Image (cartoon, rainbow, N blue to C red):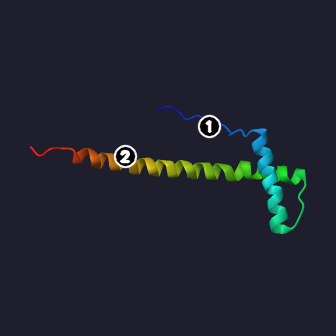
Amino acid sequence: MKRREPLRQIKLSEAQKKKLNEEIKAFYLDQRGEEIGMIEQMQLFELFEQHLAPIIYNRALDDAKQWFSQMMENADSDYYVLYKNV
């Protein structure tokens, strides 16, 4: 059996990172009424990237697998509906 290679870390563009850091800053200001510094923004971003992102990614894979399984089940049912009585 072929061994799976570990997943590569998803690389975000600098523009995407900047946007997410701005979202973190805005969240803190809106929800907590606090200014958050650049270092804290980067630390929170790295925390989410390392710990939360893999959980969300795996959940998306599970959802895609469930959807695909349902579609295959439907295709299997549709296949047998096409049979003619002989």
Q: CA distance from mark 1 to mark 2?
A: 27 Å
Query: On the picture, is 73 further left or further right than 67?
Result: left
Residue 80: x percent and y percent?
A: 23, 46
Q: Residue furthest bottom?
A: 32
Residue indicated by mark 2: 72
Label whose residue precedes the other's in the sequence (1 or 2): 1
Task: Report the label total.
Answer: 2
Query: On the picture, is 73 further left or further right than 82?
Result: right
Does 52 appear above or below 15?
Answer: below
Name the residue at 63% across, 52% down.
55
Observer-nearest of 26 and 63: 26
Residue 21: x percent and y percent?
A: 81, 50
User: Where is the C terminus found, in terms of image quarters?
Assistant: top left
Residue 56: x percent and y percent?
A: 62, 52
Residue 10: x percent and y percent?
A: 68, 40
Residue type for callout 1: Pro
Q: Residue 6, labelled with which disc? A: 1
Q: Residues within 10 Å of mark 1 (few under 14, many from 20)?
A: few
Does 19 appear above or below 35?
Answer: above
Q: Residue 29, labelled with which disc? A: none
Q: Nearer the viewer, mark 1 or mark 2?
A: 2
Q: Residue furthest top?
A: 2
Helix, strand or loop at mark 2: helix
Name the residue at 89% across, 51% down.
38
Helix, strand or loop at mark 1: loop
Q: Residues within 10 Å of mark 2 (few under 14, many from 20)?
A: few
Contact between labelled residues 2 and 1, with CB atoms less than 8 Å apart: no
Residue type for callout 2: Met
Observer-nearest of 3 and 11: 11
Query: On the picture, is 35 further left or further right than 62?
Result: right
Name the residue at 11% across, 46% down.
85
